Image (tube, helix red, strand yellow):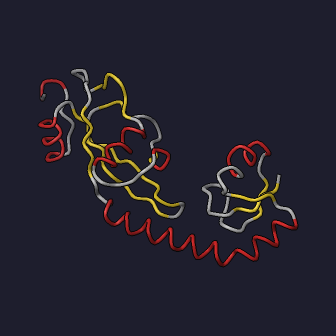
Amino acid sequence: MDVILLERIEKLGQMGDVVKVKAGFARNYLLPQKKALRATEDNKRVFEAQKAQLEAQNLENRKEAEAVSTKMDGEKVVLIRQAGEAGQLYGSVNARDVAESLEAAGFTVARHQVELARPIKTLGLHDVIVRLHPEVTVTITANVARTPDEAQVQADTGVALVGDDA
């Protein structure tokens, strides 16, 4: 199915591009999320008429995201979790946990904006990418520790406290 992208989408294209995607991806994600239009002649005319307005709105959203990213850049969030002597967590830290701790720090972030390759399962300092806008990302540090005191030591030394150190 051919669609017209209404915003930049990672690994797909820029705003205004006509791309071919699988029908299910278009029907279940792109169209309901208002990220694309079906590439019909009528929709192409509608898009061309609204292109300047969409670009202005995208630019405004990007500026807001850049303003938030300057405040959030270098932010450190502390996540207290139970862990074994070897530093393995008894659970994991996922994108929702990071988003909730950022909300507690005063930032409005949805969990889908937090990008983790895989859940965090060890103590220590972990870099986490937050995508505030399709074109704006910021890296924060997640400090996973057993206690607030241990988190402070990890933040000062940059090394996870594991085994006999704890």
Q: Nearer the viewer, residue 159 or 57?
A: 57
User: Does residue 38 sit above or below 27 in this rendering?
Assistant: below
Q: Residue furthest right?
A: 41
Q: Looking at the image, which residue is at 83% across and 51% down?
A: 1
Q: Position of residue 40 (x, y in %)?
A: 86, 62
Instruction: Give the side of residue 60 with respect to residue 38, left or right.
Output: left
Q: How many tags in the picture?
A: 0
Which quadrant holds the C terminus?
A: top left
Q: Looking at the image, which residue is at 34% across and 66% down?
A: 70
Q: Position of residue 63 (x, y in %)?
A: 46, 72
User: Dividing the picture into quarters, in which one does residue 148 lie?
Assistant: top left
User: Dividing the picture into quarters, in which one does residue 78 lie?
Assistant: top left
Q: Position of residue 131 (x, y in %)?
A: 47, 55
Q: Position of residue 115 (x, y in %)?
A: 46, 46
Q: Looking at the image, which residue is at 50% across and 61% down?
A: 133
User: Does residue 1 sit above or below 119 in this rendering?
Assistant: below
Q: Nearer the viewer, residue 71 or 21?
A: 71
